[in-house]
């Protein structure tokens, strides 16, 4: 790690020495003190470009979690923080917070999966094409011979009077379920078209394990998942890392494509479309299918350590510096798939070298300010986001500053280098008492707040700010909308669709010299202004009354007051 750190130090110094300053005439915030405005204006699009270019280089091998390239990325981030003069906020006086993890790679050549009906021939499933997933037990081998039970969406949500299990004992079963959640236009029912946490696979797997199931087969449908099967395959077919397991775990947490689910339905004498329609009713009853999953699962188990990278700018107010505003971005991506022909490096230029470039420019700008905000500023480059928000999950549970003393988390993830934005997306900000400040700041920057482009995709629950929200911290991500200067909204929408279809979680997410990082700098300045205001306000930000995270906020504040 020391050699890697030294390599990143040299590269970081070279980047700092060779990047030419290039001012962009973005509106500044008149409500900020002069020192903050001066620091904010130093945020440079070309410096963001330089960071993205390095972090997405083939040298870093896709920044895989617990792999050489990921470690280089972490060392690079730490080196930059040190160059800026920021205080280490990790373990034992370092910039690194150790995240103990277990990497699980399912071995296709040694593993078998078959759907066995009561009558008729078994249906073998080819891994990666017809099933993909991971063994959550963190054991080298597991065997399954269990009945399959269809449980609709696999949701138990008392506040919405919804229960897909209806008291059925699913202990020892494999559960077939749908991605997403029951559709509705009613904002008071699963938030209408906006996806809640109940629709996320993380919830579905955890709830099934809690109820004693041995496996889950999640039915993939592009329109419901908001991404294609290739995204699922690329995300799950390699090593899957998680924090060291505590509590119940599934032997197989898997996805199957829609055509496999149709075959399973036919083998049960049922029609999948009718089954999916029935799942949309509160009267849905779980169905024990005349099918069994027989599987032998062989795993390569790798005990590993990865690191969150944490740096702090202490606040200026002796009474408030124990509190903080957090800026976060994940530095990991999908690494290398050795068995993939052709280009097999998942460089992750947009996802999320862009967020890292923004985080580093924010850190540099704050460090140059002649005055400091009242509260401290914590910069967090987290690991293992692509593995299920694992690094930020660990940070939320082990924050260097108690969660009850964190005013706000502002996260940056996949900020497209497409030019000058005329919109900003801040999904989740409207759930906090900070939203009037967000609205006012957007006006100062001449940015229209864009509603979430695809609320059914549940993006709020798919990025690292969610891990902080779960422990009570008011949190949201900052990103561009779809309207860019000189282009129509339709142009932005088409670009977004093309990216999702062709580049998201693909080796083609690479750096190109014609990328325009103007918008990334605008988002960084906008985030700077918001963070400074939150760090200087009279009170900590809160969730609005009735929000799903309000109780967690109260709990975290009580813990902080008791010194926990």
Image (tube, rainbow, N blue to C red):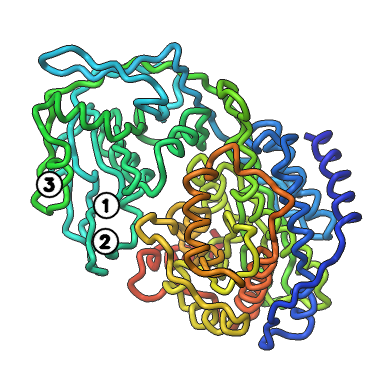
Residue 508 visible at all: yes
Observer-nearest residue: 24 or 92?
Answer: 24
Label 1 Cα crowd, 10 Å radius (few <14 / some 14-19 / many 20+): many
Observer-nearest residue: 210 or 456?
Answer: 456
Q: Residue furthest bottom?
A: 30
- Look at 29% across and 16% down and name the residue there: 124
| Image coords of residue 214 (percent x, y) | 29, 28
Find numbered disc 2 in the image and state the secondary structure of the residue it sits on: loop
Give the mark nearer the N terminus: 2 vs 3. 2
Circles 1 and 2 in contact, beta carbons < 8 Å = yes
* Image-based side of 365 in relation to 335, left or right: right
Give the mark nearer the N terminus: 1 vs 2. 1
* Image-based side of 465 in relation to 89, left or right: left
Give the mark nearer the N terminus: 3 vs 1. 1
Q: Residue furthest right?
A: 17
Task: Write down the residue under mark 1.
Answer: 181
Task: Write down the residue under mark 3.
Answer: 278
Q: Which mark is residue 54?
A: none
- Look at 61% across and 36% down and name the residue there: 346
Q: Is residue 209 above or below residue 529?
A: above
Q: CA distance from mark 3 to mark 1?
A: 13 Å
Residue 562 visible at all: no
| Image coords of residue 515 (percent x, y) | 69, 55
Q: Quadrant of the C terminus?
A: bottom right
Task: Write down the residue under mark 2.
Answer: 190
Residue 108 lies in what quarter of the image?
A: top left
Label 2 Cα crowd, 10 Å radius (few <14 / some 14-19 / many 20+): many
Circles 3 and 1 in contact, beta carbons < 8 Å = no
């Amino acid at each position: 790690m020391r050699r890697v750190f030294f390599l990143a130090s040299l590269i970081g110094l070279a980047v700092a020495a060779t990047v030419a300053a290039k001012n962009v005439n973005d509106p500044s915030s008149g409500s900020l003190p002069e020192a903050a405005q001066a620091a904010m204006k130093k945020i440079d699009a070309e410096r963001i470009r330089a960071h993205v270019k390095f972090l997405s280089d083939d040298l870093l091998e896709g920044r895989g979690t617990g792999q050489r390239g990921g470690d280089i990325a972490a060392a690079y981030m730490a080196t930059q923080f040190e160059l800026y003069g920021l205080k280490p906020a990790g373990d034992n006086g370092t910039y690194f917070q150790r995240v103990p993890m277990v990497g699980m790679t399912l071995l296709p050549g040694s593993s078998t999966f078959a759907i066995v009906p009561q009558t008729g021939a078994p249906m073998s499933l080819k891994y990666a094409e017809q099933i993909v997933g991971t063994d959550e037990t963190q054991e080298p081998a597991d065997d399954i011979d269990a009945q399959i039970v269809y449980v609709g969406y696999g949701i138990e949500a008392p506040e919405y009077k919804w229960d897909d299990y209806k008291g059925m004992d699913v202990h020892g079963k494999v559960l077939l379920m749908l991605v997403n959640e029951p559709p509705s236009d009613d904002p008071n029912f699963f938030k209408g078209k906006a996806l809640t946490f109940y629709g996320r696979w993380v919830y579905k797997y955890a709830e099934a394990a809690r109820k004693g199931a041995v496996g889950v087969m999640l039915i993939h449908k592009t329109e419901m998942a908001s991404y294609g099967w290739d995204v699922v395959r690329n995300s799950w077919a390699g090593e899957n890392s998680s924090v060291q397991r505590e509590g119940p775990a599934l032997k197989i947490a898997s996805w199957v494509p829609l055509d496999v689910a149709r075959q399973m339905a036919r083998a049960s004498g049922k029609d999948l479309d009718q089954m999916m329609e029935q799942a949309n009713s509160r009267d849905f009853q779980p169905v024990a299918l005349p099918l069994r999953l027989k599987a032998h699962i062989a795993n390569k188990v790798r005990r590993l350590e990865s690191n969150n990278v944490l740096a702090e700018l202490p606040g200026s107010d002796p009474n408030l510096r124990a509190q903080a505003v957090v800026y976060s971005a994940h530095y990991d991506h999908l690494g290398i798939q050795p068995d993939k022909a052709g280009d097999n490096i998942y460089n992750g230029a947009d996802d999320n070298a862009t967020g890292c470039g923004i985080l580093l420019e924010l850190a540099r700008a704050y460090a140059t300010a002649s005055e400091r905000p009242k509260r401290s500023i914590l910069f967090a480059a987290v690991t293992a986001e692509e593995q299920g928000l694992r690094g930020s999950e660990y940070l939320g549970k082990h924050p260097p500053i108690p969660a009850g003393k964190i005013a706000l988390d502002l996260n940056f993830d996949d900020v497209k280098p497409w030019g000058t934005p005329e919109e900003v997306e801040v999904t989740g900000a409207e759930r906090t008492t900070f939203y009037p400040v967000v609205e006012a700041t957007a006006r100062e920057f001449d940015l229209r707040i864009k509603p979430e482009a695809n609320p059914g995709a549940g993006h709020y629950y798919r990025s690292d700010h969610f891990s902080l929200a779960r422990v009570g911290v008011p949190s949201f991500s900052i990103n561009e909308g779809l309207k860019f200067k000189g282009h129509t909204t339709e142009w932005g929408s088409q670009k977004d669709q093309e990216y999702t279809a062709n580049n998201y979680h693909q080796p083609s997410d690479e750096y190109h010299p014609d990328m325009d990082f103007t918008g990334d700098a605008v988002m960084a300045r906008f985030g700077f202004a918001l963070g400074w205001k939150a760090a200087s306000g009279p009170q900590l930000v809160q969730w609005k009354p009735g929000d799903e995270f309000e109780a967690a906020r109260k709990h975290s504040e009580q813990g902080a007051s008791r010194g926990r």
